[in-house]
Image (cartoon, grey):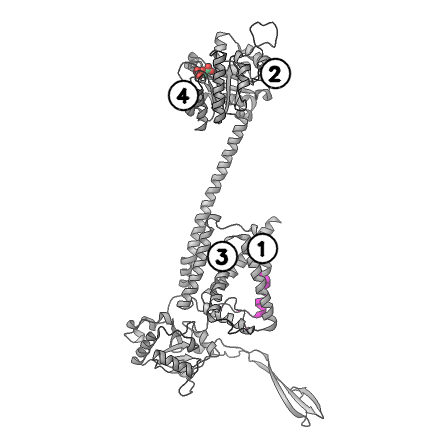
Amino acid sequence: MRYAAYILTNVCRLLLSATFILSGYVKAIDPLGTQYKIKDYLEALSLYGVFPDWTTLAASVTLSAAEFSLGILLLFAIQRRVISRTILALMVIMTVITVWIFFYDPVQDCGCFGDALKLTNGQTLAKNIVLTICAATVAARPMKMPRLISKTNQWIVINYTVIFIFATSLLSLYTLPYFDFRPYHVGADIRKGMEIPEGAPQPEFETTFILKKNGVTKEFTLDNYPDSTWEFVDSKTVQTKKGYVPPIHDFSITLNKTGEDITRQVLDSKGYTFLLISPLLEHADDSNFGNIDRIYEYALDYNIPFYCLTASGEKAIRRWQDITGAEYPFCTTDETTLKTVIRSNPGLMLVKDGVVIRKWSHNMLPDTETLDRPLDKLEIGQADQTSTMTKIMRIMLWFVFPLALLTLADRTWAWTKWIKQKRNKNKLYKLFKHKKMRKKIVAGNWKMNMNLQEGVALAKELNETLNAEKPNCGVIICTPFIHLASVAQILNQDVIALGAENCADKEKGAYTGEVSAEMVKSTGAQYVILGHSERRQYYNETPEILKEKVLLALKNGLKVIFCIGETLEEREAEKQNEVVKAELEGSVFNLSAEEFKNIVIAYEPIWAIGTGKTATAEQAEEIHAYIRSIVAEKYGKETAEDTTILYGGSCKASNAPELFAKPDIDGGLIGGASLKAADFKGIIDAWKK
Ligand code: PEP
């Protein structure tokens, strides 16, 4: 159903845009023809002559530009809502007009497609009803039309279209229509256009007679005509069937001087004839009369007949002669016919053996300098060979190709942008996921350094610094027991969490000198470091003891930073993987997956702790990836991906960025460099790079 609506909307869109583009274009290439049609409508409304000529011409150009542009905008789905509604409104108006012309027949042809396609008023009505339904369909779901061009580049299409269509109209006005759909186009044999083919349907008429007898008046036809006792009153003849009308049916030339009809003489004469065409001389442009006169002189020199055909009367002809010094003979031809022959007033037509060879607007008359030889030796004496295909190709080159190229570039650009966005979205998602599930952490391990006052001062300084400039990762400071309660009061734990460096492996009781996990928790601490190599080494903390400590810590709601790492000898013996695996298995891999979520692993190669020797980023990454893989083996890929694995061992502000850039290193556990706020902050800032 959704697809059906989509397809229907877009089929209607294409039908409407094709119609609007075609009708707009054929009107634009013939602004005068469209103006004549507008005048026909005005005449039908008894408004002829009310509007000055320039307004009807402006209306003609505007109407064609609007139709063409609306078609293009709809095709490109630019301003979809506004355009589809405008088109619907226009179609409703046009349909109302066609209902009127269908029922009252005030104009012969609607003029929708200029001279390119003539429709009967019935066909026009049917066409407009279909198009109005299409327009309503599109206006109902404008957003179902996919864009051909992105919003940022729409202005190029709009401006280019408007400029193109106005330029087309102006060029056609200055020269002649780019395509000539009338029966007097170049190459047309006028005599042939006047022929009625054999067997063509003849017009039929019916006459009604009105007769009177004994005061009674009655109507009769030839079939029931009564006897002579009836007295004839009147008769009416109406055409009941239209006969065949040849394309050229009202072309005649009457020489003004003699009143002689010279139509056949002109059309049948062998060789060239110049016909200067001016429907009305009183409206003719006289700016190029010099050129016309020179062409007339050329015609005289080479014995070429030259006539001026006009519908104007003697007065206008004399005025024209006075202004231009015209000496050529004037002939009378029907005004409408002359307007059809050429869309220029005046315009020049060259006919050879009754065939139209060339047509010129008064602005584009042949250069008189080139008229130095007989016409048959000149290019202008030959029929213009520019084919329709060549003309179509020119439009393609000037309008269709640039827009097609723009669309292609735009779509490629939009597509790459979309791919990038998708990729970024994924990245963001991953980052978000990573941030949420796998925390980046920088944890400080103060070890056995600083008295209470010094510790409090450092905590204060850190708290101020990191609250002023929020870190890009989780920050923890793990302090000696005696600092915990005081530091907890200082820290904003949303920014800096607090942890202990150890806790007892017993829950409570007579263990003099020990501090239980519960006690740690009661200070406000959230973390505890367990399994640090110094505790394993100096206080003999075995995996079993650590296992107990971990369980107690978790039980009391503490999160554990669990340290693992190999000695130098073990590294040299390439036993690091074995060692870390055994440490994890010995103390934390007994936890449930749920419990394991509270474990942060800190990989600390013993040979790097406090020695100034750091594992290279590659070495660290390699073993971090290994640790993650064994977590994955034990708890699954998802848990492994969510486990934070820190690096520890001579980590400083200078090497932190390189280490933290590795995909499996999620931060650091910092010893020496956590004792100065500036050093520690330098490492925290590595996450900002
Ligand atoms: C540590 O003791 O956890 C540690 C990593 O120390 P240092 O940063 O001083 O090497």
Residue 364 appears anywhere in the view = yes
Quarter the C terminus occupies:
top left
What label sits on residue 166 in the rendered view? none
Q: Distance between the residues labelled 3 and 1?
A: 16 Å
Which residue: 57% across, 52% down? 142
What is the x, y in percent for residue 210?
65, 88
Q: Disc 2 or 1, which lies upstream in sequence?
A: 1
Q: Distance between the residues labelled 2 and 3?
A: 72 Å
Q: Distance between the residues labelled 4 and 3?
A: 62 Å
Q: Name the residue under label 1.
A: 139
Residue 227 picture quarter: bottom right
Q: Are the residues at dot 4 and dot 3 in contact (C-beta closer than 8 Å)?
A: no
Q: Dot 2: what SS?
A: helix
Residue 618 shown in magenta: no
Q: How far apart are marks 1 and 4 (CA)?
A: 65 Å
Residue 130 shown in magenta: yes
Q: Mark 2 points at which residue?
A: 555
Query: Which of labels 4 and 3 is toward the front?
Result: 3
Point out the quarter of the image occupied by ligand 1.
Answer: top left
Q: Are the residues at dot 4 and dot 2 in contact (C-beta closer than 8 Å)?
A: no
Q: Dot 3: what SS?
A: helix
Q: Distance between the residues labelled 2 and 1?
A: 66 Å
Q: Dot 1: what SS?
A: helix
Q: Name the residue under label 4.
A: 616
Residue 575 appears anywhere in the view = no
Q: Disc 4 or 3, which lies upstream in sequence?
A: 3
Residue bounds of the magenta highlight: 108-131
Q: Mark 3 points at which residue?
A: 72
Q: Are the residues at dot 2 and dot 1 in contact (C-beta closer than 8 Å)?
A: no
Residue 222 picture quarter: bottom right
- Label 3: how many residues lie within 10 Å, few (<14), some (14-19) or many (20+)? many
